[in-house]
Image (cartoon, rainbow, N blue to C red):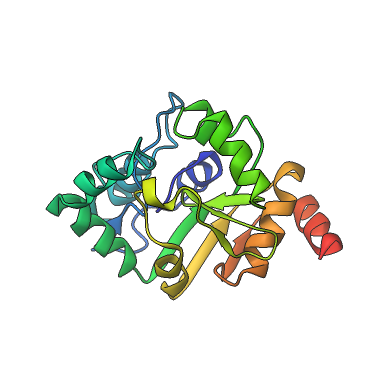
Amino acid sequence: LSWGRTLGALVRHLRPGTVSNLRIAQLAGGMDDPTPGIQGQELVRAVADLYPGSRVQYVHAPAIVASVAVRSAFLSDRTVRTALEAGSASELALVGIGSMDVGATLVRGGHVSSEAWASLVAAGAVGNMNARFFDAQGHPVGDLDERTIALEWSELAAIPTVVAVAAGADKAVAIEAALRGGVVDVLVTDEATAIQVMAAA
């Protein structure tokens, strides 16, 4: 699982006990956001509580750090590497799709400065997924990759089933681009957003 408000809403509607003995992993590090119920570690724990015998893998690190050196230090830790490896070996990924709105969680939490955000937009970024940014064709915009602790874009794409959960007029451009890139296998959205995405496509 990744993180986010919409993904948190999905988790709250999952039915308990339908499966068991899952291995559940975070796909990215944590966010500095005070909103309860949207952090990756919270969602991983919530899903594990629903299904008996499930085990969890937490990424004990922020999603985006201050420097290349800090990222290298985190990735040298066995527990962080093990969690990311578990994520990349998943059969199913649940992710959100974020827009490039200046009020996005990554900006509000201080993970990405307003200057870096403007640089991403200038480089063509129209959305983000699992703390990785992409352009209108769904290709990665790697400006922050050297400071990001999350599955690589190629690792996310290699997961057999990637389910993206996103809705809202403000996310239509990002959703269309994510679909265009071929990483997303299943989209969960609402009717109005689906109509808008299809019209744009």
The residue positioned 49% from the left and 54% from the top of the image is 95
Q: Position of residue 73 (x, y in %)?
A: 20, 45
Can residue 105 be seen here? The reply is no
Q: Is residue 81 left or right of residue 8?
A: left
Q: Residue at x 33, y 57 (%)?
A: 17
Q: Residue 151: give x, y in percent of width and height.
A: 37, 59
Count of picture labels: 0
Image height check: is 17 above or below 103? below
Q: In the depicted view, which residue is nearer to us: 76 or 29? A: 76
Residue 22 relative to residue 166: left or right: left
Position of 156 compared to 181: left or right? left
Q: Quadrant of residue 30?
A: top left
- Residue 21, compared with residue 70, is above or below; it is below
Give the x, y percent position of residue 127.
62, 50
Tell which of 92 and 86 is nearer to you. 86
Q: Quadrant of residue 100?
A: top right
Residue closest to the eye, 137 or 19: 137
146 relative position to 138: left or right:
left
Q: Nearer the viewer, residue 112 or 54?
A: 112
In the picture, the quarter occupied by the C terminus is bottom right
Q: Which residue is outermost to the top?
A: 34
The residue depicted at 39 percent of the width and 68 percent of the height is: 155
User: Which residue lies most toward the left here?
Assistant: 78
Work out which residue is located at the far right of the displayed protein and give it: 199
